[in-house]
Structure formats: structure tokens, C-alpha cells
């Protein structure tokens, strides 16, 4: 009988240990999934920043071109005004 009691004492923590092992494996899997999503998010943030810089440069170029067109239009209208006054 003493041998049965010793065996039972060893087996007594078996269920708890198995449950703890399963929970820890699930936690490791969830941590791995979260880590992968974080790394993907960092790549997306880098792409977003590069697109923002491209958009900013395009905006600056467009505004410079628009200002140039405005100046040319202003010069053309002034010339037309001067020519019309000369004709009158």
C-alpha cells in the first residue's frame, strides 16, 4: 500500500502541470502571432511615410508650376491691356 501512495503523490500534480503546459503553449502561439502582426504594421507605416513624402514633393512641384502659370497669365493679360489701350 505504501507504494500506491507514493505513485499517487507523483501523479497528483500531473493534471495541473499538463494544464499549465497547454496554457503556456497557447500563450506562446498568441505572442508569436502578435509579433508577426507588429512587424507587418511597421512595414506598412514605412510605406505610408514614403507615400506621404512623395505626395508632399508632388504638392510642392504642383504649386510651383501653378504659380508659374499664374505669372505667365498675368503678364499676358497686362500685355493685352496695354495693346488695347494703344489701339484706342
Image: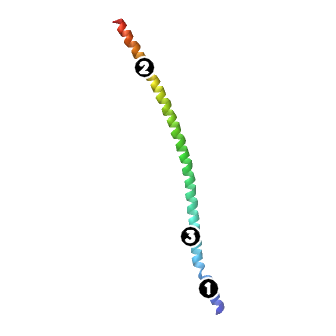
Residue for point 56% across, 51% down: 40
In the picture, the disc for residue 73 is 2
What element does badge 2 sit on?
Answer: helix
Which mark is on residue 23? 3
Task: Residue at the far bottom: name it.
Answer: 1
The residue lying at 59 percent from left, 72 percent from top is 21
Q: In the image, residue 51 lies at what x, y percent?
A: 52, 40
Q: Determine the CA span between mark 3 and mark 2.
A: 73 Å
**Crowd around label 1: few <14 · some 14–19 · many ≥20 (10 Å):** few
Q: Is residue 31 above or below residue 82?
A: below
Callout in the foreground (2, 1) = 2
Left or right relative to 18: residue 71: left
Precedes in sequence: disc 3 or disc 2: 3
Neighbor class of circle 2 (other Cα within 10 Å; few <14, some 14-19, many 20+) is few
Left or right, 20 with reference to 82: right
Of the two numbered discs 3 and 2 in the rendering, the one whose residue sits closer to the viewer:
2
Locate the N terminus by quadrant. bottom right
**Circle 1 residue:** 9
- SS state under label 3: helix
Q: Are marks 2 and 1 in contact (CB under 8 Å)?
A: no
Q: CA distance from mark 3 to mark 1?
A: 23 Å
Pick the residue in front: 29 or 61. 61
Amino acid at each position: 500500500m505504501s507504494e500506491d501512495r507514493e505513485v499517487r503523490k507523483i501523479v497528483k500534480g500531473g493534471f495541473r502541470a499538463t494544464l499549465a503546459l497547454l496554457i503556456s503553449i497557447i500563450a506562446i502561439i498568441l505572442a508569436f502571432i502578435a509579433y508577426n502582426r507588429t512587424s507587418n504594421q511597421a512595414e506598412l507605416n514605412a510605406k505610408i511615410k514614403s507615400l506621404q513624402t512623395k505626395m508632399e514633393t508632388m504638392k510642392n512641384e504642383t504649386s510651383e508650376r501653378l504659380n508659374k502659370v499664374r505669372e505667365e497669365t498675368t503678364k499676358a493679360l497686362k500685355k493685352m491691356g496695354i495693346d488695347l489701350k494703344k489701339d484706342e
